[in-house]
Image: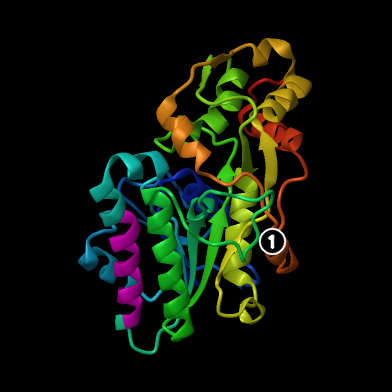
Amino acid sequence: MQVLILGAAGMVGRRLAQHLLASGRLGDQPVSRITAFDMVPADLEAGASGIDLKIVTGDISDAATIRALVADRPDVIFHLAAVVSGEAEADFDKGYRINLDGTRHLFEAIRAEADYRPRVVYTSSIAVFGAPFGDKIGDEFLTAPLTSYGTQKMIGELLLNDYSRRGIFDGIGIRLPTIVVRPGKPNKAASSFFSGIIREPLAGIEADLPVDDDVRHWVASPDSAVGYLVHGATMDLEPVGPRRCLTMPGLSVTVAEMLAALRDVTGEDVVARVRRKPDETIRRIVAGWPRDFDATRAAELGFVTDASFHEIIRAHQRETGHGLA
């Protein structure tokens, strides 16, 4: 089996590639090649996996670049490449060029290949939903995004449904929760602080909190994100039907509950490193995001998530060694 990962230098894409390299399989199929594509080289090594690892750099908004990647006819394509929420809002042209044009180029490149129908796993976002919200958002809730990022992802979802309906590829859309705790450094996503208020204090660094403690959000761990993608690539899509985009299971937690869990796991000294520093731009963006979901449909189709936010913190500690007694 050949696998193409678009956005392989990002946190989730790299973690997915590492998972495949370590296991050597995707579901019950052995993986022979992984093509890891991004604007910068993905920090990956094949090691002793025996998998042919091909690291490619380029611009997803360049149609010729994408056609060349698809010409290898990978069996599974993971599309994670994107300009994240805050950057897409700040740079209108860049957001549409990468998030929309890049997606369309990919889908058209697949369509141009004769007798070729790969599995496409598209990472969407809960940003496709816009206020006003009820208590819980189900899959039947109106998708009316209030950000450019959410709009771009929503258009991608509609394209995925239509290209799948026409048999051009076999697509599944994964609406990711906000992934917490992201290792490494903050990115340009408006949601970056959700990881920052856990990651930085655990590492002994102060972190800014730009929103109020009562802000509630839908989150999942990096390991859960990889699990969603692997399941989406290997599951039977017949029960999914024509509506191919699903909101993934997650945890609905407030900032106060996140900090309380951090206090339970590590103590007050770590929590004291979080500084209240309001940011009106971030507060405005976050105010337009949903807070809680009914992800029954995804759960019934076999997607699973984290048991608790305490476990998310502990998983990050095991990975980094930070904040361990």
Report the side of 87 relative to 294 (left or right). left
Identify the residue shown where x is 74% and y is 20%.
Answer: 263
Identify the residue shown where x is 69% and y is 32%.
Answer: 313
Of residue 293 and residue 203, the one placed in the foreground of this image is: 293
Q: Which residue is farthest front?
A: 132
Residue 216 visible to the viewer: yes
- Quarter of the view holding residue 203: top right
Mark 1 crowd level (few <14, some 14–19, many ≥20, 10 Å Cα): many
Question: In x, y percent, where is residue 246?
Answer: 59, 64
Q: Is residue 148 above or below residue 121?
A: above
Question: In x, y percent, where is residue 243?
Answer: 56, 74
Of residue 296 and residue 61, the one placed in the foreground of this image is: 296
Q: Which residue is farthest bottom?
A: 115
What secondary structure prevails in the magenta region? helix
Q: Is residue 39 above or below residue 261?
A: below
Question: In x, y percent, where is residue 277?
Answer: 49, 17
Q: Quadrant of the C terminus?
A: top right
* Magenta range: 98-111
Identify the residue shown where x is 58% and y is 47%.
Answer: 290
Question: In x, y percent, where is residue 74?
Answer: 42, 73
Amino acid under label 1? Phe
Q: Is residue 144 above or below residue 239?
A: above
Residue 69 visible to the viewer: no
- Quarter of the view holding residue 29: bottom right
Report the side of 75 relative to 99 (left or right). right
Of residue 3 and residue 126, the one placed in the foreground of this image is: 126
Q: Which residue is mark 1?
A: 303
Question: Is residue 124 shown in magenta?
Answer: no
